[in-house]
Amino acid sequence: MITNAFPYRLYLVISEESCLGRNFLEVAEQAVQGGVDIVQLREKALSDIEFLDRALRLKEVLVKHNVPLIINDNLNVARRVEAFGIHVGNNDLSPIEIKSQWSSPHCLGYSIEYIEQLNTEKTKISDYLGISPVFSTETKTDTVTEWKLNGVSKIRTLTDKPLVAIGNMNKQNAAEVIRAGADCIAVVSAICKAENPVLAAEILRNEIERAL
Ligand code: TZP
Ligand code: MG
């Protein structure tokens, strides 16, 4: 369920390398112009200093548009850039550690990779849940469960948290995933690798709105 604390519908997950050699700041800004309303910086192979530098530059762009920044799995960077929130997977920093070290009201996203995670304290204290991956994807191959539409529906029946669908999401499947119970669609390739990121975001946003 969408809440006042998490009203977002189209979520861009970006890294510099996902943008095919283009300037990732420009891609992010174009995505926002097309209708992305929340952005996560996900850099898995950088030092804290390099990660922070990218995060600060991205935040400068997002602030102009009043779009929140989420940092993937790095509490130092999240704090120093004064991010809106942090996102972690099941093998990352623990949500419990994060909540104890970084006080509310920062937004905490947690990826659900198998069903047993739902009934845990980590899930309970998270502000939104990632359904990861809905469909298998070349962007992230170390995944556990391919949820598909059935999995999205099943998770929907088990929690009221905002649900963010990720994994090979695109304009062909966004509407049906929303109808299956997701609240928000997260993408890397569908925007970062699109010829026209503004248009790609607009089309995705329309597909989402049409299914609500
Ligand atoms: N977590 C689960 S799938 C995924 C992440 C970060 C990658 C999604 O990338 P794409 O290109 O939108 O399939
Ligand atoms: Mg991880």
Image (spheres, rainbow, N blue to C red):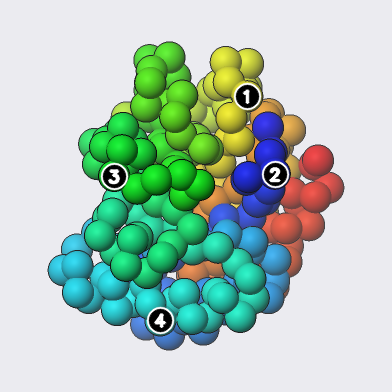
In this rendering, the label closer to the viewer, 2 or 1: 2
Secondary structure at badge 3 equals helix
Q: Nearer the viewer, residue 87 or 165?
A: 87
Left or right of 9: which side holds 19?
left
**Mark 2 CB lies closer than 8 A to ligand 1:** no
Q: Which residue is mark 3?
A: 101
Residue 128 at x, y = what percent?
Answer: 53, 38
Whole-Å distance between the Cαs marked 3 and 2?
24 Å
Q: Are marks 3 and 2 in contact (CB under 8 Å)?
A: no
Q: Quadrant of the N terminus?
A: top right
Q: Which residue is mark 2?
A: 4
* Dot 3 or dot 1, earlier in sequence: 3
* Dot 4 or dot 2, earlier in sequence: 2
**Mark 4 CB lies closer than 8 A to ligand 1:** no
Residue type at the position of mark 3: Gln
Crowd rating for badge 1 (residues with CA inside 10 Å; few <14, some 14–19, many 20+): few
Q: Is residue 177 positioned above or below 79 on the image? A: above
Q: Is residue 6 visible?
A: yes
Q: Which residue is mark 1?
A: 160
Q: Quadrant of the C terminus?
A: top right
Crowd rating for badge 4 (residues with CA inside 10 Å; few <14, some 14–19, many 20+): few
* Dot 2 or dot 1, earlier in sequence: 2
Whole-Å distance between the Cαs marked 4 and 2?
27 Å
* Dot 4 or dot 3, earlier in sequence: 4
Residue type at the position of mark 1: Asp
Disc marking residue 57: 4
Q: Are marks 2 and 1 in contact (CB under 8 Å)?
A: no
Left or right of 185: which side holds 116?
left
In this rendering, the label closer to the viewer, 3 or 1: 3
